[in-house]
Image: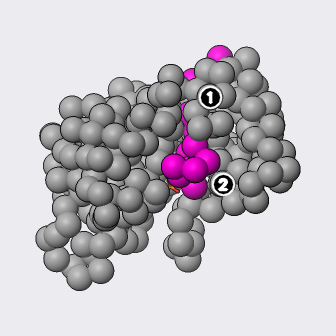
Amino acid sequence: MPLLGVNVDHVATVRQARRTYEPDPVWAAVLAELGGADGITIHLREDRRHIQDRDLKLLRETVTVKLNLEMACWEEIVQIACQVRPDQATLVPERREEVTTEGGLDLLAHRERVSEVIKRLKDAGISVSLFLDPDPRQIEAAAQLGADAVELHTGQYALAKPGRAQEEQLAILQRAAEHVRQCGLVLHAGHGLNYKNVVPVARIPGMHELNIGHAIVARAIYVGMEQAVREMKRLITA
Ligand code: PXP
């Protein structure tokens, strides 16, 4: 049964829309834990569009489950991560103009920099996951670079129309997942997962952790954070 990492970035997005103090992602994390979250995930972006340095520091002190920091290989962010020491870092690509993370890391193009960052994070005691497209070449590179885990990018699956197109994307994820496990890496997945599409991904053999943000925060607007997390947890552990 996979663990549930709840991404609270969108709570900070609402706060930053007014540059005020509410809603606070730290409160959201407390409620997510009460709802059964196994981890809290945040992305400290270079442009600080949602999560702020203060959020990371407070969450490091208050989160009692796994704290997972999504981050790009920007030098400033690497230094902050090594100081604050989240339990896990998930390395993602980051472009300023993107609305959200748009694809997996390209390890073939950025092998040296990613390798250096993995080493520095691991030396600081942080477990390292790499956010990758379900591509066997990228997965093999992750194993060579010494990552602990791979988070498979489920965005294409989430965008596919239910039916044949979605089944094809699921099959791609299933094959990639098997590859991740054969390479000796821990299997994670995330991006675009919601209450309607999550179950087949949660049931992929060996799935250890799912990171879900948008769907949970969207539902939390109506039913509250604790209940939104509880409902997702129930689905992925059924
Ligand atoms: N995993 C990674 C690496 C991400 O970048 C994101 C988005 O921040 C998520 C998971 C969560 O995606 P969503 O908000 O679509 O659930």
- Amino acid type, residue under disc 2 in the picture: Ala
Q: Which mark is residue 112?
A: none
In this figure, which residue is indicated by the disc labeled 1?
203
Q: Quadrant of residue 152?
A: top right
Is residue 128 found left or right of 55 in the rendered image? right
Badge 2 marks a residue whose secondary structure is helix
Is residue 222 found left or right of 1 in the rendered image? left
For disc 2, does the CB lie below 8 Å from ligand 1?
yes
Let me know if residue 1 is in the magenta part: no
Name the residue: 61% across, 21% down: 206
For disc 1, does the CB lie below 8 Å from ligand 1?
no
Let me know if residue 196 is in the magenta part: yes
- Amino acid type, residue under disc 1 in the picture: Arg
Q: Is residue 180 above or below residue 225?
A: above
The magenta span reads 184-198
Name the residue: 27% across, 31% down: 65
Q: Which mark is residue 158?
A: 2
Q: What is the C-alpha distance between the residues marked 2 and 1?
A: 15 Å
Name the magenta segment's main secondary structure.
loop
Is residue 16 found left or right of 24 in the rendered image? right
Indicate the position of residue 20 as horizontal and vertical percent values: 16, 77
Q: Quadrant of residue 22?
A: bottom left
Name the residue: 55% across, 77% down: 97
Name the residue: 36% across, 26% down: 125
